[in-house]
Amino acid sequence: MALSSAVGRHRNIFEKLCDPSLYTGAHRERFDENGKGRGLAGREYVYYVDGMTESPTRCHEVYSSVRERPKRKPLRRPPALKERMSGAPPRAKLIWLYRNGDKKHLGSPSFVRPHVQSLDLLYREASAEIRLLTGPVKRLYDQHLEAIRDIDDLTDGGKYLCCAGEQPCMEKLDHFLSDYVVWPTLLHTR
């Protein structure tokens, strides 16, 4: 009776072939009660070999040799790749980095590329660009001496003061606070 009710609920032959409850004989052993395949354990007798004898509490027969894969998160495209595929690629921003407390430092140009998504990554790149005496860059200030809190606060062509946690040194910021950018290559050619 159960077989006829299972046959009646399927509409076409493909649904019948894919339903493990309709399998008979040796093929029925290839699937567990949920309809998932048991792998090699459904076709052969597979045993654990651990050197111990089998007992009622210790069964060595393998019920299913199929390993469950951990559920993975779907891959996410980086935002730069999405924008490149949808249209014009985003431009890198040119910013000028100045060393805090260095009166003679003329600033060094640095490009903030689209793959830089966080301030921590920007701080690492700025630390590689500018060597501070007091440690790595931990804070950036704009020309109004306001701390940069987000990567979107950076403007193209803007000047930024690199600090390692200390406050900006006001008496030694002449080049940083001026409206002009002095290109170091122009100074060396004269």
Image (tube, rainbow, N blue to C red):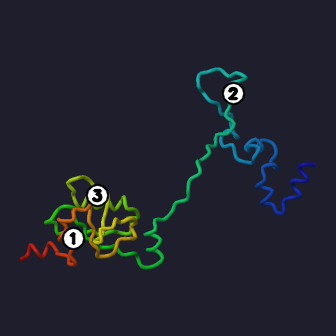
> Residue at left 46%, top 65%?
78
Q: CA distance from mark 1 to mark 3?
A: 17 Å
Whether residue 57 sits left or right of residue 135 in the image: it is right
**For the residue labelled by badge 1, is the local secondary structure a helix, a strand or a loop?**
helix
First in sequence, mark 3 or 2: give its number.
2
Residue 178: image quadrant is bottom left
Q: Amino acid at mark 2?
A: Cys
Residue 74: image quadrant is bottom right
Q: CA distance from mark 2 to mark 1?
A: 76 Å
Mark 1 burial class by Cα count in 10 Å: few <14, some 14-19, many 20+: many
Name of the residue lying farthest toward the right: 1
Whether residue 84 sits left or right of residue 187 in the image: it is right
Pinpoint residue 35: horizontal percent, then vertical percent: 75, 48
Tell me if residue 119 comes above or below residue 89 in the rendering.
Answer: above
First in sequence, mark 1 or 3: give its number.
3
Tell me if residue 124 comes above or below residue 53 in the rendering.
Answer: below
**For the residue labelled by badge 2, is the local secondary structure a helix, a strand or a loop?**
loop
Pick whichever, 36 or 170, lies toward us. Answer: 170
Pinpoint residue 161: horizontal percent, then vertical percent: 26, 65
Residue picked out by circle 3: 137
Pinpoint residue 151: horizontal percent, then vertical percent: 39, 67
Q: CA distance from mark 3 to mark 2?
A: 61 Å
Q: Amino acid at mark 1?
A: Phe
Residue 63: image quadrant is top right
Mark 3 burial class by Cα count in 10 Å: few <14, some 14-19, many 20+: many
Label pair 3/2, CB-CB below 8 angstroms: no
Image quadrant where one finds the C terminus: bottom left
> Residue at left 59%, top 47%?
69
Q: Amino acid at mark 3?
A: Val
Residue picked out by circle 1: 176
Mark on residue 59?
2
